[in-house]
Amino acid sequence: MIFNIKKNISLAGFFLAAISFVFGLLTDVQAADSVKEVRIATVAYNVNGKIGLNGSAAIVEKQGWLKDELARQGVKLTWVPVTAQSVGVTINEAFANNSIDFAGYGDLPSVILNSGGVETRIVVPGGRGNNVYLVVSPNSTAKSLADLKGKRIALHRGRPWEITFARYVESNGLKFSDFKISNLNPGAGAAALAAGNVDAFVTLSDAYQLEDKKVGKIIWSTKASTQDWKMRAELWGAKDFIAKNPAITQTVATAYVKAAHWTSQPANFNEYLKIANQNGQPEDVFRREYANDSTTWQSRWSPLFDDLVLDHYANAAQYSRKANLIRKDLNVSQLFEPRFLNAALKTLKLEDYWQPRKTASKVS
């Protein structure tokens, strides 16, 4: 009798465990199925009435793999277009009110967001970065930053290129207070330079268009600087979304790595230019932006979490604190979520395709 009781208890325990296991599986399925949409914010442009995505997002959209793979999982892909004039503010607000899950945008706004308590993570780094330019009016006699001391400079504060310009200023033994800084977005800054309301303008590759239109003249760019001075933008994900949806996050990360790999192949360069041209800039602008760079085309699109990325964000956090853009120190190591990149590289057999980069100088 005692044996039978123990046996019955054992069987009951077995069935309870089995039921719990099945219930757990159902719960996992329900949790996975509860996400019916993935929302990715990215810079976009309205060209001739058509919305064109920018950068890696444009390649991901063109390849179509992410949309198809998510659809196979019963998930809809939604691109959230953001104007280039207010990227940081718009995306930070969207992350804060949970209206997006991922975003491709720059370093400084992200540091500010995380310092404020809204946690996001870098899922896939965005390559080696883009160049920053200092433009003056065509008839200006200024040949260097020192020549602009006391002059009016248009700089959109809180945008990624502010850090680059700050490093350039400091390297010349100067401070922001040595100039009259006008906080203007890119469109307003270009207009102010053309109208003669400022003496110089800090911007990105649109500097070449200003030269072509005879309203600007480039006197400096990060092409003449070390690689870690370039402006960075990454694929960021909301911390809570990543934690609750690792499989979907992996799908998104893999799509962005696939896009980086395709773009990095020299044979695809001309096709990439056609896709990137959705922002309305002439193809020749892109060619000049990419020409005579200090890194190879393949390396330019490296998504690795190497020293170049880690030190860059340490510098970004230090600068933000020093410039009073954030009120407390930020532990930048918490910003990195490399497991999805590592898995994508393994799945795509790209573990040795890109080589990690060491920075020229370490953060003190």
Image: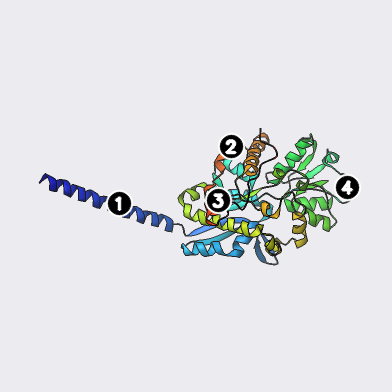
User: What quarter of the picture does the C terminus occupy?
Assistant: top right
Residue closest to the eye, 291 or 64: 291
Amino acid type shown at disc 3:
Leu
Residue 282, which numbered label?
none
| Residue at the (41%, 54%) spot, across then down | 31
Amino acid type shown at disc 1:
Ser
Instruction: Find the distance from the CA under tag 3 to the CA under tag 4.
Output: 46 Å
| Of the two numbered discs 4 and 1 in the rendering, the one whose residue sits closer to the viewer | 1
The residue wearing badge 2 is 330
Instruction: Find the distance from the CA under tag 1 to the CA under tag 2.
Output: 42 Å
The residue wearing badge 1 is 20
Residues tagged 3 and 4 counted as in contact (Cβ below 8 A): no
| Of the two numbered discs 1 and 3 in the rendering, the one whose residue sits closer to the viewer | 3
Using a 10 Å C-alpha cutoff, classify the residue at mark 4 as few (fewer than 14 neighbours), some (14 to 19) or many (20 or more): some
Task: Provide the secondary structure element on which disc 1 rests.
Answer: helix
Q: Is residue 81 visible?
A: no
